[in-house]
Amino acid sequence: MDWRTLRIVAFDTETTGLNPYDGDRVMEFAAVELFLTADGHVRDVRAHDWLINPGVPIPPKVVQLTGITDDAVANQPPFEKRASELVSLLAGAICIAHNFPFDRGFIAEELRRLGHSWPDPLAEIDTVDLSMKVFPQAQSHKLGDLAKRLGVTLEGAHRATNDAEACGRCFVEMTRREHAPTDLHGLLDWADALGEPPPNDVIGRGKDGVLCFTSGPYAGAPVERHPLHMHWMLMAVERVGAAWRPRFPESLRRWCERFLKVRGAGRARQGAKGGGADEWGLDSNALPLPEPRGTGGLSG
């Protein structure tokens, strides 16, 4: 299956803070559908951009950095009014974001409040990871810096539509420059990205389409509720004859590893925020250097 013929959606969020599990909310969501030519160039884009009333005050620093004010969102619909459109955009698509876990974490938490689950796209690709793969010597992997290296225009950064389109175009340009596989499974391997689980008797889709354990101690439970069990699956061995071997096939273990990576907490800074834009990290800027502090972004 040639992924270039499939629906490709790059998305981004602007949020009131860095922690979706401690009261911060989505205040803008944008997704850009990219349509490619047969040789992998962008021929057209279709943008979707919604301001959202977060239901909480927007901190002054976020207003300063994004330009989004309380007045701007006061008469906008809450997330619940956009949820079905958002899910329809992401479901079944090749989804791309810059610092994917950050934006996904916010959207998934907004959906959880409504009793819904993350739509599990056809593929989940993080352009931070791709930037680190393609430019391993780069000192910064911020979206703006990545765009400059690739010759992609990014005007009006820190607004969701502009960031989403730049992210999508950066993805396409990296696949072209690196001659990425055109087959979907080859693309997932090349990008170290998350796709559908391989055929197996442990993890599959539940009746509601959510990825669940189909056997074992957590049968019927969504897999993302039990990350420790997935870690155990990576290490579990069994004795066969005179030798020990992995309990689960390599393809499933590789998928679990990617799931834990892509569905992780993101690169958002976990400590207190400082006073500068870099502390808020509106562009995800994971560094390839082993530094003790993580960095991340309000927008991916």
Image (cartoon, grey):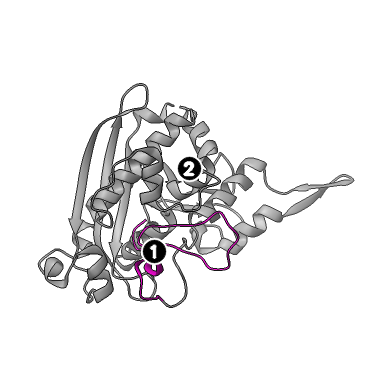
- Our reading of the magenta stretch's main secondary structure is loop
Q: Secondary structure at mark 1?
A: loop
Local crowd size for mark 2, using a 10 Å CA cut-off: few (<14), some (14–19), many (≥20): many
Q: Are marks 1 and 2 in contact (CB under 8 Å)?
A: no
Tell me, yes or no, whether the highlighted magenta stretch contains residue 205.
no
Along the line of sight, which residue is nearer the eye, 215 or 253?
253
Q: Is residue 289 left or right of residue 76?
A: right
Q: Quadrant of the N terminus?
A: top left
User: Is residue 295 at all visible to an observer of this figure?
Assistant: yes
Along the line of sight, which residue is nearer the eye, 20 or 136?
136
| Residue 272 at x, y percent in the picture | 43, 78
| Residue 266 at x, y percent in the picture | 46, 60
Figure check: 299 above or below 151: below
| Residue 168 at x, y percent in the picture | 34, 42
Q: What amino acid is found at the position of numbered circle 1 in the picture? A: Gly
Residue projecting furthest to the right: 242
Q: Which residue is mark 1?
A: 281
Magenta range is: 273-300
Discs 1/2, front = 1
Q: Is residue 44 left or right of residue 232?
A: left
Task: Report the Cα–Cα distance between label 1 and label 2.
Answer: 28 Å
| Residue 117 at x, y percent in the picture | 37, 58
Residue projecting furthest to the left: 75
